[in-house]
Image: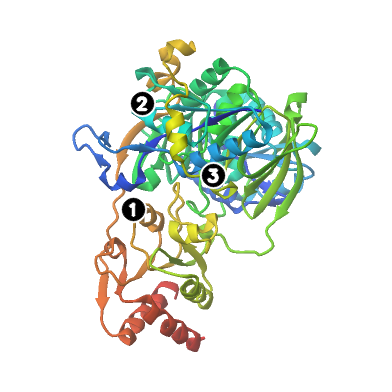
Amino acid sequence: MDIVVCVKPAPDPKFWERIQLDPITKALRREGIPSVLGPLDKRALEEGLRLKEKYGGKVRTIAMAPLGARDNLVETLAMGADEAYLLSDRAFAGSDTWATSYALSKAIKKIGKFDLIICGEWSLDGSTGHVGPQLAEFLDIPHITRTVAIEFTEEGALYTRSLMEGGCRILETSLPALITVAREINTPRFISLMGVLEAENKPLTIWGASELGIKPEEVGFSGSPTQTGEIFMPEMKRKGVILQGEPDELIAEVIQKIRQAIG
Amino acid sequence: MKDLQAKKEIWVFIEQQEGCIAEVSFELLQAAGFLAQKLDQAEIIAILLGHKIRDLAYSLFSFGVEKVLLADHPCLENYLTLPYTRVISQLIMKKRPEVFLLPATTVGSDLAARLAARVRTGLSAHCTQLDIDEKGKLKQVVPAFGGQVMATILCPRHLPQMATVRPGVYRRAIGHEKTPVIEEVPVELNPADLRQKVLKVERAKEFTCSLEEAEIVVAGGAGIGNREDWKLVERLAEVLQGTVGGTRPPLDEGWIREEQMIGQSGKTIRPKLYIGVGISGVIQHVVGIQEAKTIIAINNDPKAAIFQNADLGIVADFRQILPKLIAALEKRK
């Protein structure tokens, strides 16, 4: 089974407090914050690796990100992926989910044959959850979002259990297909020392727009239907009372506040 | 003579399951009404798909809907991406509405993403605010980095301008009662649209009020050290008839489910009362509780960030406070 796992390197949430707005340009400043794979990226890869262990085949990982994300793809190789692809080009900067999905679809077509594409349900940074379904649309394959369990029938059909509000659904889907995974699907493995050593000898390919046959105007700021306007940090300061003291007095205050709040 | 065709259209996707319309759909109609006033009195069109659901269409006309585009077909009974995308994308290509709002639910997000790719237009996710700018374009405010940063998104060159909105951002309100106009639309599916089928829908047994709809929320965080203490949080929610929420650590411990986590990908709650116990107040969580009317925080660390954003901050060990508070509230009942 040939599997492609899409990952999204994003600024490490541990350092999000350091993200600043440039007061003059109003642009987001996130210099010096290392990029990491999100927990859902790792679960997507874990699921791919488990399927490979069961059915054979190859697991390829792919990301569209600045060159600095190379380390994140090496991490996917260390976890057990066979090959990694990094789509990196100045022309990609400013791509929205439409343009990102489009570029990913071009790269996956160039890689060639695949049976299943696995993505995280959403990325750490933008968290839209759009890229999986949009990539499936560009590849003209069915997709399933929020998957928590997958299984194949002997006839090769894909059975999935996926989450929705107030329950879940069991779907049957023909391959090739794309799934996005929710956090309940598995617990990702740790990277072994062996994995780290092996990763050095595994292929990591870097492609720019021209190698994918993408014109600069099809991606990035100019190829994205959406544009980002004003960026701001939400104001959140309440002028509250902070109390310390005897538990009984504090409880009386809390009860009074509760009464005010709910009438 | 007035050219009716020239009127702009705002479309709203009506999410229904088993003949029941999701509350968020009515909230989106409220948002559409607000936008329509700023968009030359644009017409609000409801998009309703399903099987044997014509009756549902009539319930929409007291919420400002001018017309329902109704697709009724056995293949549309349960939501499936490809048939729904086929029917709606054909409608979009024919009518190119100005704005198309969908709920940021599992179904709404799944459908919106696929549709936007097919009809080549922009889509923003989890909008917390919608407005029309001076050029008549839809201003979509969305959270990024877990809500720490807010960005205004525009879709200047493509139609429809598509956005998903989380449940709870707008409130349902009765509008002008309109004369029902229901237009049945053709359902022409390709064999490729049937590459997927629903085998089973499993409903969760227990009914819990969703966090977005809850009027009272009691949430716990990393400060709650063990399962036994977590029961205090649950018990407080119970006596207040509220809903339990939490931050990432209780989720990792398995004390709450994913949908109970506050402060992820723009999940905002808007209760009358929020009580946070043992929550330090990382930015993602604080953003998620911003819209609460009253915030009470209990934490033993006086420097906890949540105190900067609470109406009442209690610096104390919750193990001392909660049992007595629960007992006192029980007595009042």
Disc 3 chain ID: B
Q: Quadrant of residue B87?
A: top right
Which residue bears the numbered disc 2? A66
Q: Is there one chain holding both mark 3 and mark 1?
A: yes
Q: What colour-coding does the image apply?
A: rainbow
Which residue bears the numbered disc 1? B283
Residue in the image at 32% along x and 84% along y:
A247
Find out whether the residues at labels 3 and 2 contact each other: C-beta distance under 8 Å.
no
Mark 2, Cα crowd under 10 Å, few <14 / some 14-19 / many 20+, is: some
Which residue bears the numbered disc 3? B104
Residue in the image at 33% along x and 80% along y:
A253
In the image, residue A71 sits, relative to residue B303, either above or below, namely above
Residue in the image at 54% along x and 37% along y:
A45
For mark 1, give the secondary structure.
Answer: helix
Q: CA distance from mark 3 to mark 2?
A: 29 Å
Disc 1 chain ID: B
Q: CA distance from mark 2 to mark 1?
A: 26 Å
Mark 3, Cα crowd under 10 Å, few <14 / some 14-19 / many 20+, is: many
